[in-house]
Image (cartoon, rainbow, N blue to C red):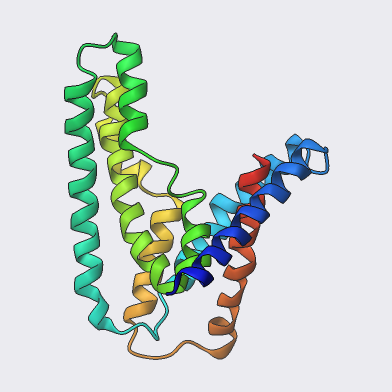
Amino acid sequence: MSSLPLVSRVMAIFLLIVIGYIARKTKVLNKDLVRGLSGFILNVAIPFTIIAGFDRSIPKTALPDLLSTGLWAILLHGMAIILSTVAYGKLPDAERKVVSYGTVFSNCGFMGFPVVASIYGKIGVMYASIFVVVFQTFIWTYGVALFSGGRAWGKLAKALINPGIISVIIGAILWFLPFDLPVFMSDADRFHVRSHHAALYGGGGS
């Protein structure tokens, strides 16, 4: 991808976020609308974008790279945990927990998918989905243990049943199916274009 189209897409993303911000400040989007839009984004828009990202036109030869992405995601989070443990070990306990969490985890789900989908398309969403599965796993293991003293590890299985991970599982199953989906179902994935635009508006308004 040349730099000019990339810059153009980033500018378009920034414009959508600014529009959302202005709408929030001018009361076009009130708190209830922002709350409802945020719920729509997290429970509908982002999961639909993930499912649509597992496009059957993407060759199965991408599987080794997807697995490699997962391994790199594990390594990245592991290194961040080690770094935060060493760097913040002498801070007061309450402060250490907050800065450690901020060092290890980003807001890669809420805003990450719309940005990736806008710039890299469906193949980018596939790679991002694998990263977020690892991200969610670390949140509900290390992240929960960080603030609970390790008492909430038993809730991992229940906590991982969320729209993001479920949509990755559904998308992966559809990607591996040996037959094409009915036309009305395959055409429905066009909705993801509108949904990640909504997520960008919501990101500016929240």
Tell me: residue 65, above or below residue 129.
below
Residue depicted at 65% across the width and 57% down the height: 198
Residue depicted at 32% across the width and 47% down the height: 135
- Position of residue 126 in the picture relative to residue 65 (left or right): right
Tell me: residue 45, above or below residue 109.
below
Label count reads 0
- Position of residue 143 in the picture relative to residue 3 (left or right): left
Residue depicted at 20% across the width and 16% down the height: 89
Residue depicted at 43% across the width and 90% down the height: 180
Q: Closest to the observer: 15 or 170?
A: 15
Quadrant containing the N terminus in the rendered view:
bottom left
Tell me: residue 49, above or below residue 73.
below
Q: Residue furthest top?
A: 92
The percent coordinates of residue 65 (x first, y second) are 22, 70
Quadrant containing the C terminus in the rendered view:
top right
The percent coordinates of residue 171 (x first, y second) are 40, 70
Tell me: residue 66, above or below residue 91.
below
Q: Residue furthest front?
A: 4
- Image quarter of residue 151: top left
The percent coordinates of residue 158 (x first, y second) are 35, 43
- Image quarter of residue 127: bottom left
- Position of residue 111 in the picture relative to residue 147 (left or right): right
The percent coordinates of residue 192 (x first, y second) are 57, 69
